[in-house]
Image (cartoon, helix red, strand yellow):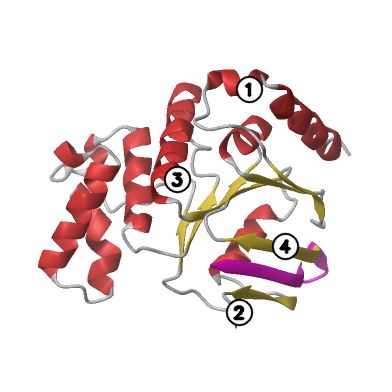
Amino acid sequence: MNIVIDSLYKTFGATSALENINLQFQGGEFVTVLGASGCGKTTLLHLLAGLTSPSRGNIYIDGEAKSAPGADRVVVFQQAGLLPWLSVEENIEFGLSLHGVPKAKRRQASAEILRTIGLEAFGHAKTYELSGGMQQRVAIARALVMKPKVLLMDEPFGALDAQTRTAMQRFLTELWEQLHCTIVFITHDIDEAVFLGTRLVVLSSRPGRVALDVPIELDRPRTPQTAFEPHFLALKKRAMDILAH
C-alpha cells in the first residue's frame, strides 16, 4: 500500500488552509501529523478520507486517484460517536451491516476484534456503560473491523484525561505492532506525536506546509522511559522550534 499526496492545495473562500503538500507514505507506517490549532492538519485528514476535495493537486492510493470516501480508508474522530441504543458488538458491526455482510460473519468479526482490543467480556454491554477509554477502543475496533488499508485518526485521545490518554497511547502502539496497518494520526501534542509514530510530519502555521518530515528512530516497545531518550528529546525540540514560529 502506497499513499502519494501530490502538490495538494486547499482553500476555503479567500482563506488558504494548505499549500503545496507533497508526501509519500508506505504501507505499515504509523505517521503522526503534528501542528498548531488552525494549521490545516484536520483538513489534510479530511482530504485523505475523501470528505472534502482539494482545490488543486491529487491523492493517490496504490496509484489510483482518490477524491471520495471509500472502504479502503476509515476515520476515527476525537469523539467516539458510538450509537447508545446499540450494544458494543452491534456498534462494531454497524459498518459491516451497511455493506451487507451476513449476521453470522459480522458476529464472528466483532468477536475477533473484541478479543484483539481486550473487551471480549463487554460485547453485550451498552456503550454508555463504558469508560471514555473503553468507548474509544470500541470506536477503533469499529474502524479496524472494516479492514481498511488506511486508518485515519483525528486527535482520537484529545478528549481523554491524562492518565487514560497515556493508557490509550500504549494500547494503540501495541495494537499497531500486532496488526501493522497504516495509520495517519493527527495531533497537536508533541510528546504524543513522537511517542506513537514511525514518522513525524510537522505542518507550519496556516497556510499549512510541510515544515518537517522525518523518521522516528526509537526502539519498540515504547515505554514511559522512551520520553527521556536523546532522539526523542531532539525531535521534540525540532518540533517545538517549528511550532514556535
Q: Would residue 68 appear left or right of 121 to someone viewing this image?
A: right
Which SS type dominates the magenta stretch?
strand
Q: In terms of sequence position, does the residue under pointer 2 or pointer 3 come before the other? A: 2
The residue pinned by badge 4 equals 23
> What residue span does the magenta drawing correspond to?
1-18
Q: In terms of sequence position, does the residue under pointer 3 or pointer 4 come before the other? A: 4
Magenta stretch: residue 16 in it? yes
The residue pinned by badge 1 equals 227
Circle 2: element type: loop
Circle 1: element type: helix
- Asked whether residue 160 appears in the rendered view, the answer is no
What is the C-alpha distance between the residues marked 3 and 4?
Answer: 21 Å
Circle 4: element type: strand
The residue pinned by badge 2 equals 63
x, y percent for residue 76: 45, 53
Q: Would residue 195 appear left or right of 85 to someone viewing this image?
A: right
